[in-house]
Image: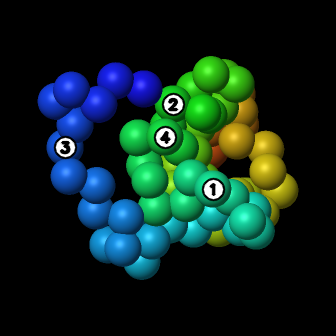
């Protein structure tokens, strides 16, 4: 990850909103790293999903599209 023009990380503030249920995740609260990681796996991060769906760890684009069609997000 390039750090030249890096913005200040607001990890403590982000942690208050982070709904990731994966214990021990090293990216919790570091949104740019989380997004980069999940997009690399064709997924979206936990914060894009309702808690009950996030806990299933199905964070695929396809699952998100289903939720959009069902107006659940």
Do the numbered discs 2 and 4 sit on residues whose CB atoms are within 8 Å?
Answer: yes
Q: Is residue 20 left or right of residue 23?
A: left
Q: Secondary structure at mark 4?
A: helix
Residue positioned 29% across, 31% down in the render: 3
Numbered tag placed on residue 33 in the rendering: 4
Q: Residues within 10 Å of mark 3 (few under 14, many from 20)?
A: few
The disc label shown at residue 8, or none: none
Residue 26 circle label: 1
Give the mark, 1 or 2, whose residue is nearer the N terminus: 1
Quote the CA–CA distance across marks 3 and 1.
Answer: 19 Å
The CA distance from mark 2 to mark 4 is 5 Å
* Residues at circles 4 and 1 in contact by the CB criterion of under 8 Å: no
The earlier-in-sequence mark between 2 and 3 is 3
- Nearer to the camera, 62 or 42: 42
Question: Where is residue 53, by image quadrant?
Answer: bottom right
Mark 3 or mark 1: whose residue is earlier in sequence: 3
Mark 1 lies on a secondary structure that is loop
Q: Which residue is under mark 2?
A: 36
For mark 1, does the 10 Å Cα neighbourhood hold few (<14), some (14 to 19), or many (20 or more) residues? few
């Amino acid at each position: 990850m390039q750090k030249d023009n890096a913005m200040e990380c607001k990890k403590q503030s982000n942690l208050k909103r982070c709904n990731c249920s994966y214990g021990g995740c090293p990216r919790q609260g570091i949104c740019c790293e989380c997004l980069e990681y999940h997009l690399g796996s064709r997924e979206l991060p936990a914060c894009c999903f309702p808690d009950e769906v996030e806990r299933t760890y199905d964070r695929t684009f396809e699952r998100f599209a289903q939720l959009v069609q069902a107006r659940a997000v």
